[in-house]
Image (cartoon, helix red, strand yellow):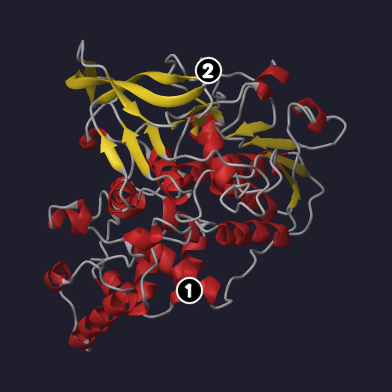
Amino acid sequence: MKTKESLNSEAVEVLKNLDGKALTPRDRLGLPCQEMPEQVPADRAHNFSEVALGYGEAQARVEALRCLQCKTAPCVSGCPVRVPIPEFIKLIVDGDYAAAARSIKTVNMLPAICGRVCPQETQCQAPCTLGKSLHSIDKAVSIGRLERFAADFERENGLSTTPTVKPETGKKVAIIGSGPASITCAADVRREGHEVTMFEAFHKPGGVMVYGIPEFRLPKAIVKREIDALAQMGVLIDTNVLVGRTVTLAGLFGELGFNAAFIGSGAGLPKFAGIPGENLVGVFSANEYLTRANLMKAWDHDHAETPIYPSKIVMVIGGGNVAMDSARMALRLGAQEVHIVYRRTGAEMPARAEEVEHAKAEGIIFDFLQAPTRVLGTGTVNGLEVQRCELGEPDGSGRRSPVPVPGSERPLPCDTVIVALGNESNPLLKQATPELAVDKRGRIIVDENGMTSMPAVYAGGDIVLGSATVILAMGEGRRAANAINALLAGAS
């Protein structure tokens, strides 16, 4: 594996050969895709430092030069918040990296985060003309990596600026939750001069970016900086407040005097497999496991705010990004052997290809076409029984359905099982607010502007969409903020 320095040196040579040359589209097609520098797998599997190290300056410029600057900009149509992608990439080519970051931030408050965790391969990079011309999504312009580069450059060089806030309006907006949807909504509403208070149930703000996504994928210092930017804008952040219990939604409008509210509380109720033995000691939801490890730093045995279950052999049930995060976290917490148990094949896994590749490189074992049937043990876990599957006809998701093979059950020895099968909406807010309409899955029902069944109450993110991406949640927050600002402008 090449180092960051060697990859950047290779890019320097490419730039030297291009010096003064006017590039044709054919020239751009021939430029090499820039590999992301990474920690060596054998090292990173035992530390919590970030795996992907980010482009060097020369790498960023070479990758940016690959962009064809299409007039139709299909990449922008693939972005949920419509980042001006060709514009910021051209600024990187010109060497004006701070301006590139400012360009992104006209619509995206969290470029350093989105550049790290968003699935660009299914969003902005999917329609990239370059990728289509080269017949491979892997050869599309690495938009996410360039977004991260620009954002990191701005932050590391102290060039970040606080968004301008208009004069105070006297109107008050409550933001419930502090994840991506809430951060975006809070920033856009505060820009208009409204007083904004963000209520977070946990003791630290940041939502899933803090409790769900591990440090080795998203350093918490980056999330904290984004939260600090909200505070600098004048957003009030009130932690340890569970809306629906500490204060009701009605109470926000009544005794606390808010004029509008946005619900961005996420989908935090974990799903289980519904198999015998899930009540045994040693079975965890991915939510609990990752929250203990990320938010409460269970890996720091001498200073942790919570214990973590000691594991030797871990089985993770599921095939999404959360399953990858759980498996890789278990490895870093000292497990000797970690398996991903998935009832389809790798081709059907919903996890990002990059996360799967990272997990495999670190030594995670993938048990495909295996459906868990029961957790084994007396009191504590000592195994997971699985049944072999074959793929049948496609289901509603478009993926081929797993069909169990009778009589193929077998035990897999383990002492820990982590269930990573997604989340549902926490029913607490609905129980405390009967007039809030939800669907059969408990997700809040909203109109085209993000408004709920209650006047002046809006919602977005996972509480509406189910489990979604950071950038999709941000798009929801922006939509609701526009509607809230329009509502309050009309009420003035």
Q: Which residue is drawn at 44% across and 69% down?
A: 150
Q: How crowded is mark 2: few (under 14 residues within 10 Å), some or many (20 or more)?
A: few
Q: Is residue 479 above or below residue 409?
A: below
Q: In the figure, residue 13 lies in which quadrant?
A: bottom left
Q: Position of residue 249 (x, y in %)?
A: 75, 28
In front here: 184 or 293? 293
Q: Is residue 176 or residue 413 the one in the foreground?
A: 413
Can you give x and y, in whole percent of width and height, for residue 492 in the image? 77, 43
Indicate which disc, 1 or 2, sits on the residue closer to the N terminus: 1
Look at the image and tell me in which quarter the N terminus lies.
Answer: bottom left
486 lies left or right of 274 = right
Residue shown at the point (42%, 26%) measured from the top left? 382
Does residue 482 appear anywhere in the picture?
no
Q: Nearer the viewer, mark 1 or mark 2?
A: 1
Determine whether the residue tagged by mark 2 lies in a helix, strand or loop: loop
Q: Which amino acid does label 1 sit on?
A: Phe
At a point 39% along the width and 55% down the height, the residue shown is 45
Q: In front here: 3 or 363?
A: 363
Q: Mark 1 points at which residue?
A: 153
Give the Cα distance between marks 1 and 2.
43 Å
Circle 2: residue type:
Asp
Outermost residue toward the right in this view: 255
- Determine which residue is flagged by label 2: 439
In which quarter of the view is residue 468 placed?
Answer: top left
Position above or below: 259 against 180:
above
Q: Can residue 248 be seen in this view?
A: yes
Q: Which residue is drawn at 32% across and 36% down?
A: 350
- Under circle 1, the secondary element is helix
